[in-house]
Image (tube, rainbow, N blue to C red):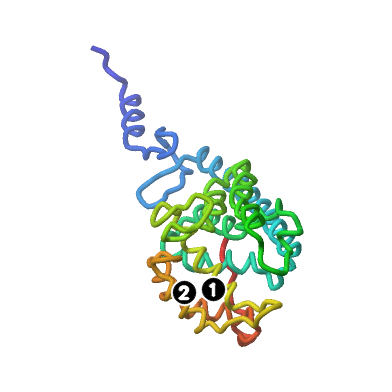
Amino acid sequence: MTIAHPDTRSAMQARNDAPTCHICGRAIPAAPFAREEDRFCCEACFLKQREQQDLQAERDSAYLALAEALAAALDAREHETGLHSQRVACHTQVLARRFTRDPQRLRQIYWGALLHDIGKIGMPDAILLKQGPLTHDEWQVMRTHPEIGHNILASVPFMDEAAEIVLCHEERFDGTGYPRGLSGEAIPLAARLFGVIDTLDAMTSDRPYRKGLSFDAAKVEILRMAGTQFDPLAVEAFNAEEKTLREMVAMKCGMAPVAMVAGWKQAEV
């Protein structure tokens, strides 16, 4: 039998009593260490995490700037005015926050909504900018834009969920959408939420051939299409966030009080 020296026993006892790093699993014999509720982190892991967070923040900032530049370029090509892509991205966030508070998921949802029509970059001007109704053949070409957009984003690291939103943003709850004819919960929730917001923005925006509808008129149409074009759950979220969405639409239409415009905080992405 080996008898440990008293100093050795003390050292062993200290190690046994020391908190354990929840990342690397090693004992933390002495300060400094970080504590998060009932979990501990050694200094080495803490510093590594901070470094990774800083790199992720820098990467996300670069992705956001690039995504917003691409969306602005597409809006300009379509002769879209009023920051349509950024509006629907921010408005979709309002609904998404009712279902998740995960920053990474919200970031993906923002990017997916922002770049929903990025596939239209592959559409010929004769189709994309046509003033009159599209022919059957032209519609067949136009209906490929979700898949083109998905292919563009699918090759970008860390944009998997955003790419799925782009692919599914023209699907309808009753299965009559495209490109895959998905229905119900087979459509990603974020795409179902986006569908309501995109329609709201389209109906309340001025077009060369018509004046934008009021929020109340758009609301009537959205409620009417619950269960067909729109997921009733998404319409329920729309109703719950009516006050916020009404204010955001008023900003777009130039009817919002100055104090509200100045005080509204853009979605954290």
> Of 58 and 74, which appears nearest the observer?
74
Task: Look at the image and tell me in which quarter the C terminus lies.
Answer: bottom right
> What crowding class fits label 2: few (fewer than 14 Cα within 10 Å), some (14-19), or many (20 or more)?
many
Q: Which element is circle 1 on? A: helix
Q: Which element is circle 2 on? A: helix
Q: Amino acid at mark 1?
A: Leu
Q: Residue at x 62, y 41 (%)?
A: 155
Disc 1/disc 2 C-alpha distance (Å): 8 Å
Q: Is residue 11 left or right of residue 151?
A: left
Q: Is residue 15 above or below residue 221?
A: above
Q: Residue at x 55, y 56 (%)?
A: 107
Q: Residue at x 56, y 67 (%)?
A: 198
- Confirm or deny contact between disc 1 and disc 2 (CB under 8 A): yes
> Of 158 and 125, which appears nearest the observer?
125
Q: Residue at x 42, y 37 (%)?
A: 28
Residue 1 in picture, x, y percent from top left:
23, 12
Which residue matches tag 1? 200
Q: Amino acid at mark 2?
A: Ile
> Of 66 and 166, which appears nearest the observer?
166
Residue 224 in picture, x, y percent from top left:
42, 75
Tell me, for residue 213, which label it has, or none: none
> Of 225 and 192, which appears nearest the observer?
225
Which residue matches tag 2? 222
Q: Is residue 183 left or right of residue 17?
A: right
Report the number of numbered marks: 2
> What crowding class fits label 1: few (fewer than 14 Cα within 10 Å), some (14-19), or many (20 or more)?
many
In the displayed image of the protein, which residue is found farthest to the top? 1
